Image: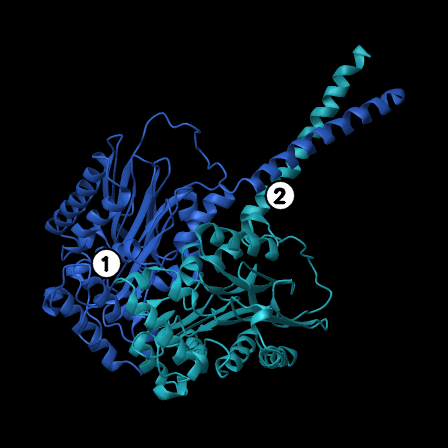
Chain colours: A blue, B cyan
Amino acid sequence: MKSHLPKLLVVSLLLIFFINCKKSQNTESETQNSTPKLRGETSEPTEKHFAIVIHGGAGTIKKANMTSEQETAYHEKLQEALNIGYAVLEKGGTSLEAVQKAINVMEDSPLFNAGKGAVFNSAGKNELDASIMDGKTLNSGAVAGVSHIKNPINAARIVMDSTRHVLLSGKGAENFAKQYGVILVEDDYFHTERRYNQLLKAQKKDKVSLDHSAFNTHELIDDHKYGTVGAVALDKNGNIAAATSTGGITNKKYGRIGDSPLIGAGTYANNNTCGVSCTGTGEYFIRTLAAHEASNLMQYKNLSLQESFENVIGQIDDLGGDGGMVGLDKNANIAWYFNTEGMYRGYKKSNGENVIQFYKK
Amino acid sequence: MKSHLPKLLVVSLLLIFFINCKKSQNTESETQNSTPKLRGETSEPTEKHFAIVIHGGAGTIKKANMTSEQETAYHEKLQEALNIGYAVLEKGGTSLEAVQKAINVMEDSPLFNAGKGAVFNSAGKNELDASIMDGKTLNSGAVAGVSHIKNPINAARIVMDSTRHVLLSGKGAENFAKQYGVILVEDDYFHTERRYNQLLKAQKKDKVSLDHSAFNTHELIDDHKYGTVGAVALDKNGNIAAATSTGGITNKKYGRIGDSPLIGAGTYANNNTCGVSCTGTGEYFIRTLAAHEASNLMQYKNLSLQESFENVIGQIDDLGGDGGMVGLDKNANIAWYFNTEGMYRGYKKSNGENVIQFYKK
């Protein structure tokens, strides 16, 4: 036996050398390739899949609190938004147009906290935010704190297409969008009884609380259903787009801007990875750069989209925040995840799948 | 020989098994540990290093264009900012206080496009932005479009410390900050001849250009020196903070918000990785989430801070943008990188290093 030890040693050393060579080759190719293959990716997809996924906000959405009429109303409106977005994609339209049109449907409905159904700020006015991103070019557009634009996502699109800027705010954003013919509305367009009562309730709470405490406690933030709307689509050309639109938070003061108009926080799209739209307590999505973080976890850690979402919502949960996110990757894989009671959500894919859900399973 | 092959095989298989076990253990610990070891990190630093790094903007800063008086003025002011921030750290103060005080020095100087030296918007007013982030908690605060706050970074700090929000904007942000006793100034505080002449020059160009074209061309964006200021510090407790303050762009319209008040774009800090402050054509820093991207490249791709910066500025360069970034990692390694002619920058470390530079080498 003793005489064979050198041979064993040589064979072992060769083996170790071989394994290490393989390892360092892998590391090198990973570093040099800025768009690494994503898990499950095939180099030549046999068929051009397309898909759209949307959300209508996350929050305390429980079966026990919903009438069947409410369920039907939300279901029908989400299906309408999906159908309109899907039709754009089916005809060969762009993912940008698909997400914009799907969001327009939800903005025009009083069911969601965006456009028509926007909540009131502390002055009894409405301040709306929206953003859109093109995953092909990383071009982005957004508006924050606009008060007279019927469909803020359309203004965000104009900012993206017609300026070198990404984010315009307040009166300036309105003046800019006017020049491009967006539909303007009077203050009373956004007046819905439901939202006004939410304001009165919030202000009543505010009155009996300490100075600024209403601004600091969970109460006012938790009082609404986070009815932000969002859409993400993949078109036949393999381009991903994402968009988000919101009416902010009830009784908000001081020109607060949440995550919805912020690229990388509430909205992100990148053809190399995925598209994402978020909803929830916006500040936690800003601090974690939730949408961008999900994309980076795919690109740099090789996680699947679903794994990325679970990781990011985990980070938000650790910080004490809540909400959810929906998205899709370049292979039309759909993902969503949330740590709230529910999230209005749905998707429609070119393989015939059509799903709408409200609650946790 | 033949009779020994089974033995060789067993030994080889055991070796492969052993190596694979080690490998999967490493993978597992990397996945479970949300703060992976960074390159060059030692598990027990022998000494508590601390450091501060600052910038005063990037742009067409060339030796040929600078008088020796100008060089001296910038050098002295950057050294003053470094000294004040460093003194905070030396006494055991927080990195948050250090970056805030260093930025106050630059905000109070007319040399930089922040605070006192802020540029004029198209209406002949000043709209200032600032943000700050705590790498220990990921808490963040920011203000956008404030016009009467002497030191916007102080307002950003108050938003971080005293609200559950991250970003407040416009008049609302001012009204909020007033309640916390920030120093308010009249419009004329920000009136400097140099900035006013820049506005007149920009408006003259605007007049002869097509509608909106001034808003779309490089001209007005490139006309200023990107004099945004920023600071990043690591304190004796190992906490990293980053902050950025700016006067925006000359002749800006429509309530444009750049990257400086946006967490993850112009400013980011995370004790697990690094702190970053950016300056340049803000829109490209938003689209690439420049500051957050640099942190993620360290965390998920194991790049050094310097490699991360070069990667991110490369991404910005590819999109057609320019600017620079400064930062430091948890081991007090300093990094900066820019694709412009120059960047006002400097750092001071507890190991005695003290560097100030303006130009490309």
Which type of secondary structure does the marked residue at label 2 adopt? helix
Residue type (three-letter) at the residue carrying disc 2: Asn
Q: Indicate left or right for B228 with A194 as reference.
A: right
Bin the neighbour count of mark 1 within 10 Å (Cα to Cα): few under 14, some 14-19, many 20 and up: many
* Residue B259 appearing in the image: no
Q: Name the residue nearer the viewer: A50 or B28.
A: A50
State which chain disc 2 sits on: B
Q: Residue at x 38, y 66 (%)?
A: B220
Bin the neighbour count of mark 2 within 10 Å (Cα to Cα): few under 14, some 14-19, many 20 and up: few
Q: Nearer the viewer, mark 2 or mark 1?
A: 1
Which type of secondary structure does the marked residue at label 1 adopt? helix
Residue type (three-letter) at the residue carrying disc 1: Ala
Q: Residue at x 68, y 31 (%)?
A: A19
Where is residue A131 drawn, in percent x and y?
30, 57
- Asked if badge 2 and badge 1 are on a common chain, one would say no
Where is residue A187 drawn, in percent x and y?
12, 69
Residue annotated with mark 2: B26
Where is residue A71 drawn, in percent x and y?
15, 48
Q: Distance from label 2 to label 1 (Cα)? A: 49 Å
> Vertically, is A355 above or below B286?
above
Q: Indicate left or right for B185 with A227 as reference.
A: right
* Residue B43 appearing in the image: yes
Disc sitting over residue A155 in the figure? 1
